[in-house]
Amino acid sequence: MAKHSETSWKQDHPSTLFGNSVQKAERLLKHAKSHPEEIAIEHAFNQIEHAENALTNAVQYGEHLDMVKQNKEHLELIRQQLHEMQGKVE
């Protein structure tokens, strides 16, 4: 098994991956707000699903749970905003 460098390990860390997924969901939410089309909203919802999978992995790993909790709350806000937008677009 190849030895990971410190940087590589941090990038691969479940809580880091979850944080990155939430940031990507945030970017997709902003894009959907500026381009309120069904496809943009759908991409953001797909990213939320991806982030939820990363959340499951981060929780199972059990480290940095305060950061994970903060990102989970942020993800919920993103989801709520997308649901509101979806209602306006449909």
Image (cartoon, rainbow, N blue to C red):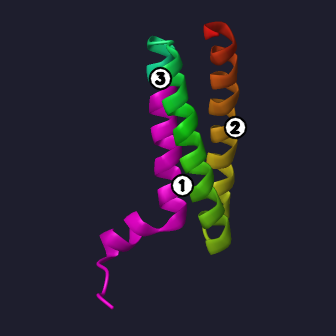
Where is 58 relative to 3, above or below? above
For numbered disc 1, what is the local secondary structure? helix
The residue that label 2 is drawn on is 76
Q: Position of residue 13 (x, y in %)?
A: 47, 68
For numbered disc 3, what is the local secondary structure? helix
Q: Is residue 15 left or right of residue 31?
A: right
Q: Nearer the viewer, residue 64 or 75?
A: 75
Q: Is residue 2 visible?
A: yes
Q: Position of residue 10 (x, y in %)?
A: 40, 68
The residue that label 3 is drawn on is 40
Q: CA distance from mark 3 to mark 1?
A: 21 Å
- Whichever of labels 3 and 1 marks the residue nearer the N terminus, that label is 1
The residue that label 1 is drawn on is 18
Where is 46 relative to 20, above or below? above
For numbered disc 2, what is the local secondary structure? helix
Amino acid marked by disc 3: Ala
Q: CA distance from mark 2 to mark 3?
A: 18 Å
Q: Is residue 37 left or right of residue 89?
A: left
Q: Nearer the viewer, residue 50 or 38?
A: 38
Q: Main secondary structure of the magenta part?
A: helix
Magenta segment range?
Answer: 1-30
Q: CA distance from mark 1 to mark 2?
A: 13 Å
